[in-house]
Image (cartoon, coloured by chain):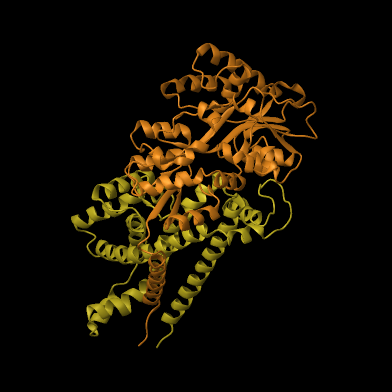
Chain colours: A yellow, B orange
């Protein structure tokens, strides 16, 4: 019996839908025409123009700063939350906690954006970088907690107990046994939080204050007057950065896994 | 002692973040007043910003929005901190009616004497009580010179059967029904059902010759020669013209829609004096001329017109002949009467 070609075709189509638009964007960023319709020759002029746009770099810096801080804070909060959720998974309180953590994932973004804005205004907090960070942490914590929780579900806690039996304090056991073994999960959760924060437009638009324009907000507003090829060039650079980060993190976690398997 | 991958990663992130934070705070001098603009991106010549900063000993921070509606929703929900905003006229009326704008102090705005009275006569806020016009654009007709014979600057071009299937009109009810109203000699803010019924018949006649109603792809379409004649916004057409010299832009002799972004001061503005100084600065004729040359929209400042390049003065995409501009109108917010247009537009789309 011949093997069906169907799965192969479906996989191919899915990959095409994933990557073809990105490829078009990358190709267009080298098109000297500002309209995607026709190819008018290879050019690096959009990249050159990009380097003379201080406003874009200012927003890029804001975005990066926010994303790094958000990643850090939501990793700490999300992981501790996941540990509590896992350890006391049968208690009523933690089941309620789980619902609370889960809710931000299903709340529509626009609702979250407006409600956060109204909360900040009511509390008299000045809108700016800080409010963006608070808002991003609010939804990133949930993603981190659920990702780490998934890891904990097939985590062998007897190893931690063994460490305690051998005289490690709870702090040392957590730092030298629990955390390293959770590392791949933490790295994945951190990357998710980082990407979500860099990407977010709707919520950020509402909670951003004067002087705190992030890259997605800048990009959207460039569509009216600015040149779209500049956006293509910028996106290509971002893609390169993202792919490098993912590649590095994969290499890191692969070598980490290898190291932990070699006997000391 | 051996450290592990995770803490190292976290530590690295924290160090980078701290570095960026230092950069964040170390930037500006603390004692200078800061003027916050909330505007469209690339909407002022960059050199002019630094000139204003040094003349007034202040710092200007520009934040951007991508649509009037999003900006309005955000301010309405209580966001503050912005001083000068540049919404489109129809949104300015709405914001004014909601008490979100400050009344302007004309004593601080001597340059308002340069504002074009011809434009003000068709503007919504004719006395500039709460808004000052900043930049004008208009919608009109773009066509390929080599392919369209006997071109005449009239909306009646869409009746031409020889261009059937190669023409596009905007997928915007106010713009397209408005074009038909102007073609018939009515106001494009008309709310008379009889006039709208006649306009509907005109658009239905045009529709038979159109490839489609469309707002974005028409630019690529005319650049590549797929479409021969399109109804579009002057700002968009100017960008396409830069690549295809065969494209010409014309304003129909019956007139059409003009749209204007205005300078307004938010009710919650902190730097009210500086905000006035900024508006006054932009209407200095030399500054206005420089700005028009860069943005390629027209700042309605009559004393700047003489300083504009000939290429701009002769470009109907930027500078309209006075007799044609007198026939143009600003699209006004029609409130509840908007439903009349929605109904006509639905009928047109359904071919009835």
| B340 shown above or below A191 | above
Q: Quadrant of residue B173?
A: top right
Q: Is residue A192 above or below residue A205?
A: below
Residue A27 x %, y %: 66, 56
Q: Is residue B155 above or below residue B94?
A: above
The image quadrant that residue B350 belongs to is top right
Extreme residue toward the top, this view: B194
For this rendering, which residue is in front, A207 or A181? A207
Task: Give B336 or A70, whichever is nearer the viewer.
Answer: B336
Is residue A165 something that shows in the picture? Answer: yes
- At which x and y percent is residue A257? 44, 76
Write down the quadrant of residue B220 in the picture: top right
Task: Count the numbered circles shown.
Answer: 0
Q: Looking at this view, is A133 or B292 the one in front?
A: B292
Q: Is residue A1 visible?
A: no
In the image, residue A96 lies at what x, y percent? Answer: 22, 53
Residue lying furthest left = A92
**Quarter that holds the N terminus of chain B:** bottom left
- Residue displayed at 43% across by 53% down: A200
Q: Quadrant of the C terminus of chain B?
A: top right
Image side of residue A243 versus residue A40, left or right:
left
Q: Is residue B141 left or right of residue B144?
A: left
Relative depth, front residue between A140 and A16: A140
Point out residue B195 in the picture as x, y percentages from the top left corner: 55, 13
């Amino acid at each position: 019996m011949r093997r069906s070609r169907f799965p192969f075709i479906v996989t191919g189509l899915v990959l095409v839908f994933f990557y073809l638009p990105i490829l078009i964007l990358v190709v267009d960023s080298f098109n000297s025409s500002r309209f995607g319709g026709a190819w008018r020759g290879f050019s690096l002029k959009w990249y050159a123009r990009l380097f003379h746009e201080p406003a874009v770099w200012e927003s890029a810096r804001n975005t990066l700063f926010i994303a790094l801080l958000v990643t850090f804070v939501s990793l700490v909060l999300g992981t501790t939350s996941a540990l509590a959720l896992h350890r006391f998974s049968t208690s009523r309180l933690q089941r309620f906690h789980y619902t609370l953590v889960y809710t931000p994932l299903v709340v529509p973004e626009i609702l979250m954006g407006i409600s956060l804005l109204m909360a900040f205004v009511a509390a008299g907090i000045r809108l700016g970088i800080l409010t963006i960070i608070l808002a991003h942490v609010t939804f990133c914590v949930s993603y981190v907690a659920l990702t780490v929780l998934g890891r904990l579900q097939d985590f062998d806690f007897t190893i931690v107990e063994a460490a305690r039996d051998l005289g490690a304090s709870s702090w040392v056991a957590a730092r030298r046994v629990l955390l390293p073994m959770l590392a791949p999960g933490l790295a994945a959760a951190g990357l998710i939080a980082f990407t979500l924060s860099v990407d977010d437009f709707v919520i950020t638009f509402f909670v951003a204050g004067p002087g705190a324009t992030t890259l997605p907000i800048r990009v959207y507003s460039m569509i009216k007057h600015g040149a779209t090829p500049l956006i293509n060039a910028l996106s290509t650079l971002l893609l390169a950065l993202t792919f490098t980060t993912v590649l590095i993190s994969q290499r890191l976690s692969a070598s980490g896994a290898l190291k932990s398997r070699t006997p000391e | 002692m051996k450290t592990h991958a995770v803490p190292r990663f976290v530590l690295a992130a924290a160090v980078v973040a701290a570095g960026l934070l230092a950069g964040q705070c170390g930037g500006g001098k603390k004692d200078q007043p800061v003027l916050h603009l909330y505007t469209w991106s690339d909407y002022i010549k960059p050199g002019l910003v630094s000139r204003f900063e040094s003349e007034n000993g202040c710092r200007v921070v520009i934040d951007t929005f991508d649509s009037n509606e999003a900006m309005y929703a955000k301010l309405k929900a209580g966001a503050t901190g912005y001083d000068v905003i540049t919404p489109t006229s129809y949104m300015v009326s709405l914001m004014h009616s909601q008490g979100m704008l400050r009344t302007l102090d004309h004593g601080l705005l001597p340059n308002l004497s340069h504002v074009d009275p011809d434009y003000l006569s068709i503007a919504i806020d004719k006395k500039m009580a709460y808004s000052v016009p900043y930049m004008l654009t208009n919608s009109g007709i773009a066509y390929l010179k080599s392919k369209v014979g006997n071109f005449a600057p009239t909306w009646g071009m869409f009746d031409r059967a020889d261009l059937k299937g190669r023409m596009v009109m905007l997928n915007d009810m106010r713009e397209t029904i408005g074009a038909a109203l102007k073609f018939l000699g009515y106001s494009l803010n008309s709310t008379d059902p009889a006039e709208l019924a006649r306009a509907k018949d005109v658009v239905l006649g045009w529709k038979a010759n159109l490839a489609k109603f469309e707002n974005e792809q028409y630019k690529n379409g005319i650049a590549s020669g797929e479409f021969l004649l399109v109804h579009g916004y002057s700002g968009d057409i100017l960008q396409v013209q830069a690549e295809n010299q065969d494209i010409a832009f014309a304003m129909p002799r019956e007139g059409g829609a003009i749209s204007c972004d205005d300078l307004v001061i938010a009710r919650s503005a902190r730097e009210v004096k500086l905000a006035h100084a900024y508006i006054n600065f932009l209407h200095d004729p030399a500054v206005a001329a420089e700005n028009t040359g860069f943005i390629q929209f027209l700042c309605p400042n009559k004393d700047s017109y003489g300083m504009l390049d000939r290429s701009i003065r002769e470009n109907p995409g930027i500078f309209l002949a006075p007799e044609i501009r007198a026939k143009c109108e600003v699209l006004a917010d029609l409130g509840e009467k908007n439903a009349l247009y929605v109904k006509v537009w639905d009928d047109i789309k359904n071919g009835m």
